[in-house]
Amino acid sequence: MASNFITRALAKTLKQPYDFDAPLIINGIEIKPGERKIIDIPFGQLVSHDVAKLRVHVIRGKRPGPRMLVTGGIHGNELNGIEIARQLISSRRLSTLRGDVIVIPVVNLPGFLIRSRYLPDRRDLNRLFPGAEKGSLGARLLHTFLHEVALKCTHCIDLHTAADGRTNLPQVRICGDDDVALAMGKAFNAPVILPSPIRDGSLRAALTFYGISTVLYEAGEANYIDIPAVKFGVAGIVGVLISLGILHERKSDLKRKHPSALCTQSTWLRAPSGGLFRALVPLGKAVSQGDLIAAIGDPFSTQETKLLADSDGIVIGRTTQALVDEGDALFHIGLPSSSLHSRVEERITQAADHILADSDPTPYYDPIGNE
Ligand SMILES: [Zn+2]
């Protein structure tokens, strides 16, 4: 649940709930039903003296409906979400909406410019919510983001990757007691859904406080673009938009049904010794208790330590580092609600094959400009 700090700070900053019948005005610019606009909202000046702006793509349907916010790059080096946002705003499908879609490809512009997860002052933007009008650069950015955009939306999908040095199987994280978020998570149809507690100061904490159901999509690793992760992401957002009635379903969408594995919890397997780490199982693999899943070699001898799975589950994340100290987190294992975890692996493999074979999860404009 949202912390008392979040509760008090948000309650102080927003005097009354947003009126969804009112005209949609962002940074003083009105976007009418059926219109599409790109709005740059200044939030502070950088060391270069350039004014930093939040770029917001607003796509409104002619007919009223829910208003979905899609955010990428809250962590500045998490690039899959930025590419997902780009492909989404290029999609022809967004030309007919019942409701609105608002996309911010890069929330953390200062972090993105320095190719970092963090802000230039080393703070984590996703721990600074709700921000403050007169606070640090990150706090000002969040205050602008929340009050100009996010609190004017009804639902949110927040796009992430694993942190530096780790990679994630495409997965959706939801708040366990939010039924709307669970329904959105199922409609996203990522290989795995994992309940995860809301962290203080995060986007999810802030939006959940205001009743804006938010799901987190985590896929791939920082600093890289992973094609399956992007494809699952674009198709997943389209699935959620369909489930909310913002987009209508097409026959080709019906082919993509591979239900997500619902994990009830997850656990990290840590390095039993230091040395050279070699993973012996890929992401998405079903492992059984006692399976050999990795080896850690002593760099100065032929000695090796074996790492065995300590429970039945699915590999949903792992380190990408070869050099590990004793105790380092190596594998993130999701524990599926069904005991047939080998069936879960089969479904994950089928879904991955399907998404890779499908060259057109959502038709989008030719980026070279041949349209
Ligand atoms: Zn992140």
Image (spheres, grey):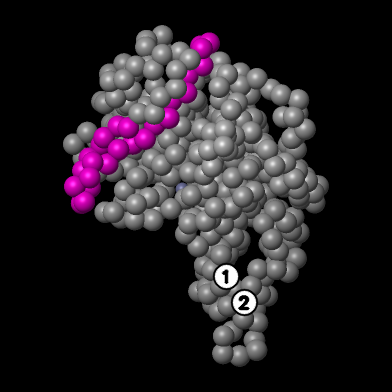
**Mark 1 / mark 2, whichever is N-terminal:** 1
Q: Residue 165 appears at what percent x and percent y?
A: 50, 62
Return the residue at label 2: 296
**Distance in Å between CA atoms under marks 1 and 2:** 8 Å
Residue at the outermost top position: 21
**Dot 1 and dot 2 residues touching (CB under 8 Å):** yes
Q: Residues within 10 Å of mark 2 (few under 14, many from 20)?
A: many
Q: Residue 277 appears at what percent x and percent y?
A: 60, 74
Task: Write the start and end of the magenta stretch as one range.
Answer: 40-64
Above or below, comparing residue 343 to residue 163 in the picture: above
Q: Residue 188 appears at what percent x and percent y?
A: 63, 34
Residue 329 seen by the camera: yes
| Magenta residue check for 51 | yes
Label 1: state its secondary structure: loop
- Kind of residue at disc 2: Ile
Position of the C terminus by quadrant: top right
Query: Residue at horizontal 26%, vertical 35%?
Result: 42
Return the residue at label 1: 271
Front residue (pair 210, 1): 210
Residue 180 seen by the camera: no
- Kind of residue at disc 1: Ala
